[in-house]
């Protein structure tokens, strides 16, 4: 493609001068309309489309949109990720996983985070532009985030990516993220956000490519659509992603009701729609809804799906990814009018990102490189991690006194970095593990660490201190070839401190295929067995001339082998990989602990108290995973229990009689029934991002007063839930669950206490369709300053379809001891509405109860209530 661009006409080179990031030149007199910034975005996009041939049009309808050299239009890959930071594109600030972000109940900070992520994305994009490079996958400016599916069942492995189980909370947090990502410039988007996965989608992972989800109109309107509506109508999100599964007989990416009736007709969405990856192929292969791929392409295109995510890498056979669209046009399955409308939407997006304008006109093209991983972004990651901490139990052991002299830290997750990061993450520069954070928070105490089990002990990159090159320098000698078979002299030979590469660590391979070899010696710091291996793809590892690991497919979790090493002894090591332009590989290891449980118990006996860091991680739950561990299947969970190895550890250290504080690491609800009865304190830290360890340590020490609230219900077991594949909301989430949970939605303790005065309403009786004002006073009655999450719930009349109660407002307030604050809520008719069994949203007449407090009414949270009546019934306008 680069050769084709060089060989383009003189006109093409003139046109390219207008691209963002290239040196600005005075426009030529014959510059086409799509380069004319005086014209409207629509006019410019239409000018591009009318110039395209049928094959060029087809080539723009896939994620890997091709360059059009004769027009000076560069290639663009629509696939980038930014769930909680710029993901899969090298070093970037890693914020907490979204389920932890939801626990903050802090939309203002989520919006700030969205802006920080967009800024870092611009830095990375601009760096590639300035280098004259071609943007590859994960290097674009539109991001397939946020995930606003409703976390209806804690067994779903991807629930960690969501903002929890409540549609109102999800909508508020999603709108904040989108507005932060897209910015407020009237002419250019900072970046473009994508709300996914539209719209009825939340597992199981194993059947997502072919399952037909049957769901009532009530549940669609009441649960599955509201957050998407909020992002479209309020957040003005510019992109949506349709899901894999079918909904009531039609694939989500070819669904008349979702894509036409709701998205376009009711909501007036005018952005672009992208398919989940291979979801268009699933229309034919998985759902058998069409006979051919061309028919599948046409069916989705006619309903407004503009981008087919079909290829992770550039296809080996040029055009095979967009061939179904070309076939659909040739066979008359889709009109040129439909194709052109899709292309106009796509080019409008690229124009509003500034991709066809001089850099001098695009404010975001001027972002300083220093904004990447800036101190301000790191501080924001720390703030959000601190706000996400949810204190579930405390018998007075927390905050830990500075008089404690010896602390035993146990648990396999305490010293792990990967558990901080969740999934769809970037690479942190300075991650702080829980163990690091505890040590920093208690500098005068003796900290003894024992993992207590080898379960979940993930590997870490082999450090430079354990590696040495032939000349004794730290690290390994790296040799790089511009071919895939190590032929000839390497184009570059250098010393690499670690075999840990990502897209920020540019090797010098220029061709489409390259190879790399690292050689030297490895020395273990202590005698023992080490699990050592590789993540990445198409790589091999030798130790002392013996091949111990071979990785053929790209894997995130390293493939390892057990190797015995003696302390101080040098072993020869060789790693080879055949790859593309950028090697993505990691040499990692972990020492196997002998008799881990006994060592942990011995440490507990020596200590004044025990802090256990345990739970699950994204190595167990996630997207379509191959996990063979009891309680987990395909990325989902089969039960909600704490893994047995970790619960055995908790029981063993508690049996010593020492106080026990449990720090949970998790992306979904855990049925920690034993800990709820026996631990002295439980702090839920989720997957807290790169600064998670600092937040954990400061919360345990009292520097941070915990203020997070649960965005999901913690059940006692799966026995309390309907079958996982049942999408009915009956007996699911706090809005419809009739049992007694272990911990309820909205729950969280503090190191201080709060109290509420009775809410004052603007009217005790109002006509259906009218708004309601609410004033409430909250007071800090304790001895510490702290943040309170003021939550407003409405309990509805006993009309068919109405939930038990529903969150309709919340705000975060900071109060000093003895301080009080009046908070105000304006409830719209939509806030006061419910959905009938037939799926109609109405404000129903009858008696209502409104509760304002630190959690749901009827729980241990401080609350105050007021009653009001609505006369008549009124439909709610879209």
Image: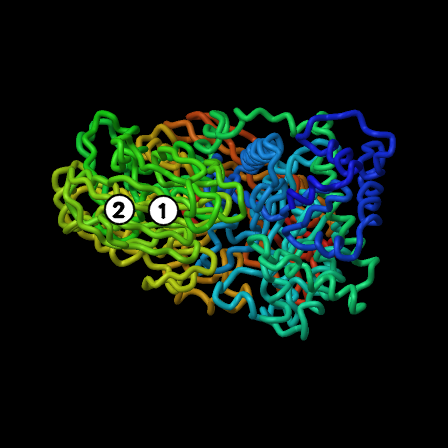
User: Circle 1 sits in a helix, a strand or a loop, which is it?
Assistant: strand
Mark 1 to mark 2 CA distance (whole Å): 20 Å
Residue 474 position by quadrant: top left
> Horizontal and vertical percent for residue 760?
60, 38
**Which mark is drawn over residue 643?**
none
At x 36%, y 41%, the residue is 499
Marks counted in the figure total 2
User: Circle 2 sits in a helix, a strand or a loop, which is it?
Assistant: strand
> Horizontal and vertical percent for residue 25?
76, 25
Q: Is residue 546 left or right of residue 133?
A: left
Q: Is residue 225 left or right of residue 371?
A: right
- Within 10 Å of disc 1 (Cα), the crowding (few <14, some 14-19, many 20+) is many
At x 50%, y 61%, the residue is 732
Q: Residue furthest right?
A: 29
Q: Is residue 212 left or right of residue 430?
A: right
> Horizontal and vertical percent for residue 307?
68, 54
* Of residues 14 and 169, the one drawn nearer to the viewer in this rendering: 14
Q: Is residue 406 left or right of residue 347?
A: left
Residue corresponding to mark 1: 665
- Residue 76 visible at all: yes
Residue 840 versus residue 51 in the image, above or below:
below
- Residue 798 visible at all: no
Residue corresponding to mark 2: 590
* Of residues 71 and 216, the one drawn nearer to the viewer in this rendering: 71
- Within 10 Å of disc 2 (Cα), the crowding (few <14, some 14-19, many 20+) is some
Residue 690 position by quadrant: top left
* Of residues 651 and 617, the one drawn nearer to the viewer in this rendering: 617
């Amino acid at each position: 493609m680069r050769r084709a661009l060089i060989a383009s006409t003189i006109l093409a080179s003139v046109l390219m001068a207008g691209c963002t990031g290239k040196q600005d030149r005075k426009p030529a007199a014959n510059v086409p309309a799509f380069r004319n910034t005086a014209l409207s975005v629509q006019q410019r996009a239409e000018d591009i489309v009318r110039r395209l041939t049928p094959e060029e049009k087809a080539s723009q309808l896939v994620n890997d949109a091709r360059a059009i050299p004769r027009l000076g239009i560069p290639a663009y890959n629509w696939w980038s990720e930014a769930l909680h930071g710029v993901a899969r594109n090298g070093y970037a600030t890693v914020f907490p996983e979204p389920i932890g972000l939801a626990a903050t109940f802090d939309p203002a900070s989520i919006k700030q985070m969205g802006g920080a992520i967009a800024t870092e994305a611009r830095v990375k994009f601009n760096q590639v532009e300035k280098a004259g490079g071609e943007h590859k996958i994960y290097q674009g400016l539109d991001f397939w985030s946020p995930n606003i599916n409703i976390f209806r069942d804690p067994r779903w492995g991807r629930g960690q990516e969501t903002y929890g189980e409540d549609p109102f909370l999800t909508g508020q947090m999603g709108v904040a993220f989108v507005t932060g990502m897209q910015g407020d410039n009237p002419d250019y988007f900072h970046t473009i956000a994508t709300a996914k996965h539209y719209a009825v989608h939340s597992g199981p992972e194993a059947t997502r490519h072919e399952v037909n989800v049957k769901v009532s109109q009530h549940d669609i309107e009441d649960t599955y659509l509201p957050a998407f509506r909020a992002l479209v109508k309020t957040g003005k999100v510019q992109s949506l992603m349709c899901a894999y599964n079918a909904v009531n007989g039609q694939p989500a990416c070819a669904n008349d009701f979702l894509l036409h009736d709701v998205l376009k007709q009711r909501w007036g969405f005018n952005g672009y729609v992208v398919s989940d990856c291979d979801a268009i192929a699933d229309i034919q292969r998985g759902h058998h809804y069409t006979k051919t791929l061309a028919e599948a392409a046409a069916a989705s295109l006619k309903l407004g799906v503009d981008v087919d995510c079909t290829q992770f890498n550039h296809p080996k056979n040029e055009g095979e990814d967009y061939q179904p669209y070309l076939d659909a046009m040739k066979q008359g399955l889709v009109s040129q009018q439909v194709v052109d409308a899709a292309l106009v939407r796509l080019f409008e997006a690229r124009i509003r990102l500034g991709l066809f304008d001089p850099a001098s006109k695009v404010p975001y093209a001027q972002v300083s490189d220093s904004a990447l991983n800036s101190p301000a972004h790191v501080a924001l990651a720390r703030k959000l991690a601190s706000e996400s901490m949810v204190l579930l139990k405390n018998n007075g052991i927390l905050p830990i006194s500075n008089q404690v002299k010896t602390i035993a830290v146990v648990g396999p997750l305490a010293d792990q970095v990967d558990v901080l990061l969740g999934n769809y993450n970037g690479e942190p520069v300075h991650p702080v593990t829980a163990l690091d954070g505890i040590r920093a928070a208690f500098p005068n105490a003796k900290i003894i660490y024992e993992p207590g089990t080898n379960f979940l002990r993930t590997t870490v990159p082999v450090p430079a201190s354990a590696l040495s090159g032939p000349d004794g320098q730290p690290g390994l000698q790296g040799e790089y070839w511009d071919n895939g078979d190590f032929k000839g002299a390497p184009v570059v030979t250098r010393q690499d401190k670690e075999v840990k590469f990502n897209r920020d660590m540019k090797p010098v391979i220029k061709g489409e295929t390259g190879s790399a070899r690292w050689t030297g010696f490895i020395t273990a710091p202590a005698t023992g067995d080490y699990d050592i291996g590789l993540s990445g793809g198409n790589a091999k590892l030798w130790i002392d001339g013996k091949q111990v690991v071979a990785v053929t497919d790209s894997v995130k979790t390293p493939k390892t082998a057990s190797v015995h090493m003696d302390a101080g002894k040098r072993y020869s090591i060789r790693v080879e990989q055949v790859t593309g332009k950028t090697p993505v590989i990691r040499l990692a290891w972990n020492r196997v602990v002998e008799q881990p449980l006994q060592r942990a118990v011995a440490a507990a006996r020596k200590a004044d108290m025990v802090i256990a860091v345990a739970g699950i991680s994204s190595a167990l739950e996630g997207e379509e995973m191959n996990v063979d561990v009891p309680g987990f299947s395909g990325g989902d969970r089969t039960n909600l229990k704490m893994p047995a190895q970790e619960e055995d550890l908790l029981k063993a250290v508690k049996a010593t009689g020492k106080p026990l504080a449990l720090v949970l690491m998790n992306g979904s609800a855990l049925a920690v029934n034993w800990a709820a009865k026996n631990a002295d304190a439980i702090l839920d830290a989720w997957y807290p991002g790169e600064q998670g360890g600092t937040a954990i340590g400061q919360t345990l020490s009292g520097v941070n007063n915990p203020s997070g609230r649960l965005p999901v219900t913690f059940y006692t077991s799966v026995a309390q839930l309907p079958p996982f594949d049942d999408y009915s909301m009956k007996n699911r989430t706090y809005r419809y669950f009739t049992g007694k949970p272990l911990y309820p939605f909205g729950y969280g303790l503090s190191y201080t206490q709060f109290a509420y005065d009775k809410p004052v309403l603007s009217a005790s009786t109002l006509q259906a369709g009218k708004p309601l004002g609410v004033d409430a006073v909250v007071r800090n009655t304790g001895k510490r300053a702290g943040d309170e999450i003021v939550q407003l719930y409405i309990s509805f009349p006993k009309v068919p379809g109405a939930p038990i109660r529903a969150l309709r407002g919340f705000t975060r307030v900071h109060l000093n001891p003895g301080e009080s604050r009046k908070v105000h809520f304006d409830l719209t008719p939509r806030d006061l509405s419910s959905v009938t069994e037939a799926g109609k949203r109405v404000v129903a007449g009858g008696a209502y109860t409104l509760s304002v407090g630190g959690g749901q009414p009827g729980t241990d949270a401080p609350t105050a209530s007021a009653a009001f009546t609505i006369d008549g019934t009124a439909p709610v306008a879209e």
